[in-house]
Amino acid sequence: MNGPETSLNTTPDLQIRIGSLELDNPVMLASGTCGYGSELADLLDPGGMGAIVVKGISLEPRRGNRPPRLAETPCGLLNAIGLENVGVEAFISQKLPWLRDRGVTTIVNILGSSGDEYEALAKRLSGCEGVHGLEINISCPNVKAGGVAFGTDPKQAAEVTKRVVSATDLPVIVKLSPNVTDICTIATAVEEAGASAVSLINTLLGMAIDIHKKRPVLGNVFGGLSGPAIKPVALRMVWQVARCVNIPVIGIGGISTASDALEFFMAGAAAIQIGTATLVDPGAPVKVLEGVVDFMQKNNYLSVKALSIGSS
């Protein structure tokens, strides 16, 4: 790694750009773990983060999976929430005003079971004041393709990305699934389709069994594994993707400390998202941001980009 920049005691530049969107700092709240923002109001100021990515929004409300929907694992958490949400119209009328009134940079995670649904969501959200970007959840099953997840097939991933990009003037982030053989192929496909950035990784597919009841712990049998246990996998994939695309890479997966975040920045991430850590310590995102700034000041790094291994 090249050494830090030579200017001493200079406040580092934390701003990053995702398409047309400029964030004040590179620490974001990840979709699914911060609700619609207001849930953390007494514990954390979402406006102090670079952005908040609200929980996944679909065209119609979703009830989610039957319980149990959470299971703790060594160094991680399995969840099978089932993308429960209020639906786009209720989000716009009931949830978005709270975020807008507080000046929160809001990115909406969108999900669907067909390209038509993704496109409709992008169109509906594009004209809404207070929505600053879209994040596409491509881990959803494409019902027209027999339930195959969009994110596991480069052509489907590119197609849904292209449809969303053509339907909006907002920056479009594509959230990549780790449950693939070659993540760079998927990342390159969505970049070529017009994505402004990619975020990775989504949860790893896993399960747990109750040996006393002799049955799966989760009502849905399988769930998504998040938390510190997946950090090495996420870090490896961020490293790979950062070297195969020219758009910003947003790192997600097991980040709970400033050291974790710095590893992702050094691997090539332009920004990070913090999720599961907020369930343990709602103040974690603030502590991570403060720790990153402290490290940069002490080691004379003037920008987040300069942290990347191989940067000049």
Image: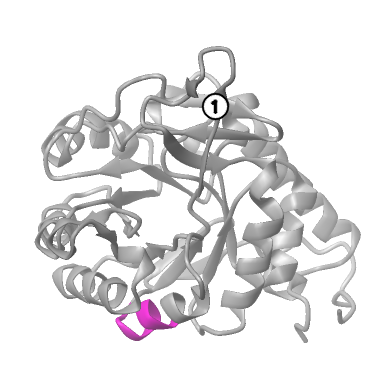
Q: Nearer the viewer, residue 299 or 29?
A: 29
Residue at point 27%, 65% (across, down)? 170
The three-letter code of the residue at mark 1 reads Ile
Any part of residue 282 in sight: no
* x and y, in percent, of residue 52 in the image: 44, 44
Residue at point 71%, 37% (across, down)? 287
Residue at point 29%, 64% (across, down)? 150
Q: Main secondary structure of the magenta part?
A: helix
Q: Nearer the viewer, residue 132 or 207?
A: 207
Quadrant where the C terminus lies? bottom right
Residue on which disc 1 sits? 209
Left or right of residue 237: residue 161: left
Q: Choose top left, top right, bottom left or bottom right for residue 81.
A: top left
Q: What range of the chain is rendered magenta?
A: 188-194
| 284 within the magenta span | no
Is residue 208 placed above or below 7 in the rendered structure? above
* x and y, in percent, of residue 107 in the image: 36, 51
